[in-house]
Image (cartoon, coloured by chain):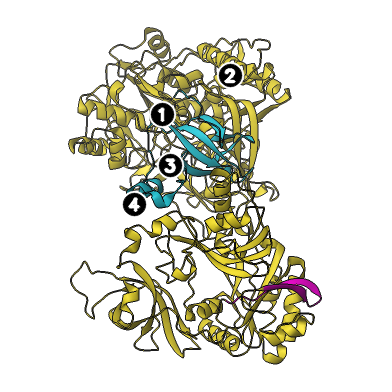
Chain colours: A cyan, B yellow
Amino acid sequence: MQLIPCPWCGPREEAEFHYGGQAHVAYPGDPSALSDEEWARYVFFRENPSGPFAERWSHNAGCRRWFNAVRDTRTHDLLAVYRVGEPMPEVTA
Amino acid sequence: MSFRTDTGGAIDRNTLLRFTFNGVEHTGHPGDTLASALLANGVHEIGSSVKLGRPRGVVAAGSEDPTSLVQVEAPFSEPMLLATTVELYDGLVARGLAGQGKLSSEPDPARYDAKHEHCDVLVVGAGPAGLVAALTAARSGARVVLVDEQNQAGGALLGVDEYLDDRPSAEWVADIVAELKSTPDVLVLERTTAFGMYQDGFVLALQKRTDHLGFAAPASVARQRVWRIRTRQTVLATGAHERPVVFADNDRPGIMLASSARTFLHHYGVLPGSRAVVFTTNDSAYCAAIDLAESGVDIAVVVDARPEAPARLAAECAARGIEVRAGQLVTGTEGPGRVTAVQVGDDRIACDALLVSGGWNPVVSLFSQARGTLRYDAELGAFVPGRELATVRVAGSATGELDLTACTRQGRDAGAGAAAAAGFTSGSQVPLPASDSRCTARSGLVLWRVPGNDDASFVDLQRDSTVADVLRATGAGLRSLEHIKRYTTIGTAHDQGKTSGMIAAGIVAEALGVELSEQRPTTFRPPFTSVSFAALAGRDRGDLHDPVRVTSIHPWHVQHGALFENVGQWKRPWYYPQPGEDLHAAVLRECRATRESVGMMDGSTLGKIDVQGRDAGEFLDMLYTNMMSNLKVGKIRYGVMCGVDGMVIDDGTVIRVGEERYIVTTTTGNAAKVLDWMEEWLQTEWPHLDVHCTSVTEHWATIPLVGPKSRAVLAAVAPSLDVSNEAFEFMTWHDTEVAGVPARVCRISFSGELAYEINVTAWHGLAVWEALMAAGERYGITPYGTETMHVLRAEKGYPIIGQETDATVTPQDLGMSWAVSKKKPDFIGKRSFARAENNRSDRKQLVGLLPVDPAVLLPEGSQIVETDRLPEPPVRMLGHVTSSYPSAALGRTFALALVRSGHERIGETLYVPVEDSLVPVTVTESVLYDKEGARRDG
């Protein structure tokens, strides 16, 4: 059972968290201006890197806050966590 | 004949325990395991093998034993236990297994629980290295937990009669345990096996608390406990298991690991037989030979596979009249069951025990589970821990080190290192003991197998997997140990290959002509030893398995004979059968009463979310497909919610309570999901919006009052409310008093009938329900459940989210374009409605189906096809039946279905395969009852 360091609550067990997929995929400002393909990229396409990956997590069974984390997908190590609105920190995998 | 020694061992010879094995009564002593007691009685045949039915005995003295599987029958039937780990108690009844046990059909009466523990340093294993590690960490002031699977500390020292610092090793062990137990913040857990090691210092351990008490176990004490340990640093002092050598007919009872025979002698006072052959590749078995000879066992010969026997030990053997044959091998065994003779070269040597040592395998399971990498040690012939991990240290023979003083030095270093890493400075140093041991296992010969009859040379005794099986696998082209493990099943039994895995790897490497250092060992996975589901379930059984949510009106439903269905965690009344009624009869009655007069149901489980804030309207406009910001205070609107892909995820009503306040309802099962959905958008996309959402589901009791007489019933209990159609319009709400308590009454309908939804605080739910029942009595008011609700809404073509929809259905597919705003510039899902895929004419769309035979009820989930004869497969499926009921109002059966191009097919005849026939059905609009909506206003 991994510990996830919630930026609001500190380290808590992963069972308290909910995964939210890739971070920094903003809702398009004007969806109607996008082509079908551009819209489909927003709706369906996500990165799948081997290595550091910025993702969204929600501390669902705790403070219920969403935050961002950089996770190394090879090891599951969380390299950084940061609050919504903060820029992604530099990490070294 | 007794094989019990007169003295020695940690058993109480003055107390007799009676037990029954395979129907025969025996006796043993406190301190015995079932295995030691059986061996003391000369019983070596425990069970038989799973595939071949060959007799099997006891190979090892501890949890690594691959063969001594038993089923304990009393006090409670429990399968697949090892006789070597079942502590003997008076009245024990057990039988040997043929590789498989039988689960009891009775519920287990014992309690099981779990406990959380947090520590700075966890030490696994209370052998010499672990004890020194724990004491070193404890003296630094760290919070220490020491777990060990045996019933007392000592580890390998329990199986020898060696002296440490010129006194019995048991005294050295006792001193350390005493100091540990008297140190604050140190927890010593016996009979506790760390069986799983996970990320971030999370370790699961199973403690057997009362198993050994048998019938005397107090019912108030949990029989077993799962410790959920979170530690900063871990020291693994998990020891080593002796490794056998594979040869022909190596599976007979009486063939045992040499060190285990020594353990049976020194810890239990039990001899393995009268005349034993010892077969070894290293020095350690000489001590077993010498100790057993001194205890009266006739050691026929020590067969040493090495070209030269060790001079000093050979001399000790000679002094005791023990013959040593160097450079020879055991090539086979004989016996009707238990071994009676051993073949060594050309000689047939009679014996009743064969003691084998092929070297030692460090126990690296937990280290590997913690993602430690393993390295092959060619001198040892075993995988050993590779690079150290940041939070996991390994000490003692688990590293491959077999000298006792060196093991304890590793323990001291690991304990100090772990404590320092956890932030503690070391205390007074623990002195390292000197051992008088004469037999170390290094300088051995690595020997996996003796060539012979491959079909009778067993690698995994529990799986009946032989050398021939391994060679079949490599012959078939398999090279990876993971693949060969699955092909041969070696290492997949209860023992997880503790004694067989390394040998299998060695035989594979030989067969493939590769170096073991190039082979990746198979991954170790939890659990290290078997853990029962009862222990894992702990207290979460029966009523405590999952929370049950009931409404404030629930007691009334129970009293009135409702049958319940589970909706998420909620118990909802399903229907209220009267005497003699089945589901169909009850539902037809409930539907008829509601459509013809008045019915009511408990709708309290409906999800309710209070949405407040300056931007609440703007927020809901983005979440729902239709406009909510222009809803007037006092009004109600039905709304559909979609994902960004344009697929329906929920629906419900939105009522505007104030300028900056809405209450939205969700389907019962989606309440938490919709609140999460709202929070996700508010926090991650629109944090600038001033909106706050709170679940108020359990604050309200909600009672839909439905049917043409509902107005009269409401009027009777709400005298201050003008219930006329003009004063109280459809899709509006009024705050008033119902049955004397404050209530919010909404005029909404999920049945097409005149209907009111009465909301009161949950405290008053039951009282208001009873008042409505009383007021409706003259109209024959009928309580109805979810089944009738489903029928009434289906007759009107209203979809149930999750029944008519499955995340591939749009509002347009449901025929609900009317609920999709054309005016709003954007809302979640809007852009997807314009995608080409969403506008295909052959999308599956919601329609009604009327079986041509009005008495035929289509099974829900049935497929729909185009022709009255099934063509050759693959048959094109047009869709499936989502809901199907008999209808009182229609006087016939009907169904809802998702059908390709369904809206264009209205009027067509399609076919539904039901068992062996194709049922013809007519496609209709989804609304089947009161299409013009004439009943809405009563």
Q: Position of residue B71 (x, y in %)?
A: 49, 49
Q: CA distance from mark 3 to mark 4?
A: 55 Å
**Element type at marker 3?**
loop
Tag 4 and tag 1 share a subunit: no
Quickly name the residue at label 2.
B418
Q: Residue at x 22, y 25 (%)?
A: B346
Three-letter amino acid code of the residue under disc 3: His
Is B221 located above or below residue B193 in the figure?
below
Q: Residues within 10 Å of mark 4 (few under 14, many from 20)?
A: some
Q: CA distance from mark 1 to mark 2?
A: 34 Å
User: From the viewer's perspective, is B454 left or right of B633?
Assistant: left
Task: Residue B578: name its quadrant.
Answer: bottom right
Q: In the image, residue B866 lies at what x, y percent?
A: 25, 76
Q: Which mark is residue A36?
A: 4
Q: CA distance from mark 4 to mark 2?
A: 57 Å
Q: Which residue is mark 1?
A: B257
Q: Chain of mark 4?
A: A
The magenta segment is B733-749
Q: Which mark is residue B428?
A: none
CB atoms of marks 1 and 2 within 8 Å: no
Mark 3 touching mark 2, by CB under 8 A? Answer: no
For the residue marked with disc 1, what is the amino acid? Leu
Mark in the foreground, 3 or 2 = 2
Q: Are marks 1 and 2 on the same chain?
A: yes
**Marks 4 and 2 close (CB-CB < 8 Å):** no
Say if mark 4 contacts mark 1, CB within 8 Å: no
